[in-house]
Image (cartoon, helix red, strand yellow):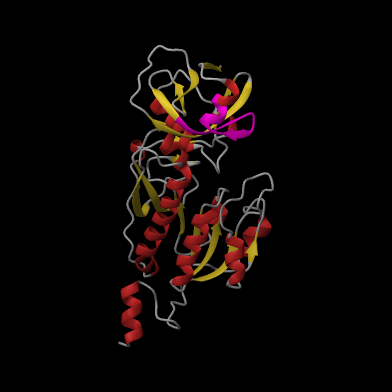
Amino acid sequence: MSQAQVNADAAGFPEPGILNPASSAVVFAYHNVGVRCLSVLLAHGVDVALVVTHQDNPKENIWFDSVAQLAALHGIPVITPDNPNTPEVVARIRALHPDFFFSFYYREMLKKELLDIPKLGALNMHGSLLPKYRGRVPVNWAIIRGETETGSTLHYMTEKPDNGDIVAQQAVPILPDDTALQVFQKVTVAAEMALNGVLPALLAGKVQAVRQDLSKGAYFGGRKAEDGMIDWSQSAREIHNLVRAVAPPYPGATTSLMGKPMRLLQTLMTKCSATGATASFYVKDDKAYAICGSGVLRILRFELDGIEMGAQAFAAQYGLEKFAFNR
């Protein structure tokens, strides 16, 4: 065995020029997870015949990396159909005779006619520890519901979302003040690690898949900007979880103060108690606070009427009295 092969085996990657000619794939991908997981496939010598991705929506905050740019860098053909299940797209993909499909944060469901094409299976990377948080925006939901752990799961695809047999999982912690962006960055690394760890066995046909116990999780739907409206009857912990779950680059947690729109961008839990008090905002000792249904939050960053300001600037303009949040 050559030293190059020893080094390649140690790293989990094939020696350059020694690729498995049977390892061909069509990749459906978007977002940072798509970029990192496509990179893993390429590092392992998978022949990616086609990348199916999305056109960026000009109305969306595009803060993430581009799968299309990575594919172009490697000379991989790219298509961006609105619907991947049309006869034209299905015919093009079938003609490639891929061994695998991989879906990495691709936003459209693949129907049976597509899923039946790959000879060795279609696999999806999901951003939770399945069977928990099946469905849309799993990172945001996990934070809103106060989870202390999440991760990424590689599983076989079926016509029903996120319910196929599990191939690999990688867990990551959710710390008490982590924002959705911070957790998503961890989940992206978890996806890369899970795929990199299992891919040699998967390509060799030696993977051991595990059936999901769907009774141990639930399905969650997508979220809209208006779902970030704060319910001030909730506890400080619940509101803190909402704030960090929808903090920028997401739309943010919203309320109204003095008849003006307000966004809370960053909060901290405090040991203060104000049970039964009217939900309100105030500044004390150059720090901003919010009285919640139970407990008090410190407001580290906020916007009022579209302008971000600090506690001192707010106090200088409006004074130190308590201002009730508009419901």
Task: Place residue 275 in its image quadrant.
Answer: top left
**Could you tell me if residue 304 is visible in this image?**
yes
> What is the quadrant of residue 14 in the picture?
bottom left
Q: Position of residue 280 (x, y in %)?
A: 49, 18
Q: Tell how many labels.
A: 0
Q: Who's the residue at 39% across and 51% down the image? A: 153
Which sits in the foreground, 188 or 20?
Answer: 188
In the displayed structure, 39 sits above or below 250; it is below
Q: Residue at x 39, y 55 (%)?
A: 190
Relative image position of residue 82 (x, y in whole percent): 67, 51
Q: Is residue 122 left or right of residue 215?
A: right
Return the residue nearer the eye: 233 or 221. Answer: 233
Q: Is residue 213 magenta?
A: no
Q: Is residue 310 magenta?
A: yes
The answer to whether residue 116 is visible is no
In this image, 37 relative to 3: left or right?
right
Q: Nearer the viewer, residue 295 or 123?
A: 295
Residues in magenta, as a range: 299-315
Above or below, comparing residue 48 to residue 167 in the picture: below
Whole-percent x, y for residue 152 in the image: 40, 51
- Quadrant for the N terminus, please: bottom left
Q: Quadrant of the C terminus?
A: top right
Residue drawn at (66%, 57%) of the image:
80
Residue 163's place in the image compared with 260, above or below, is below
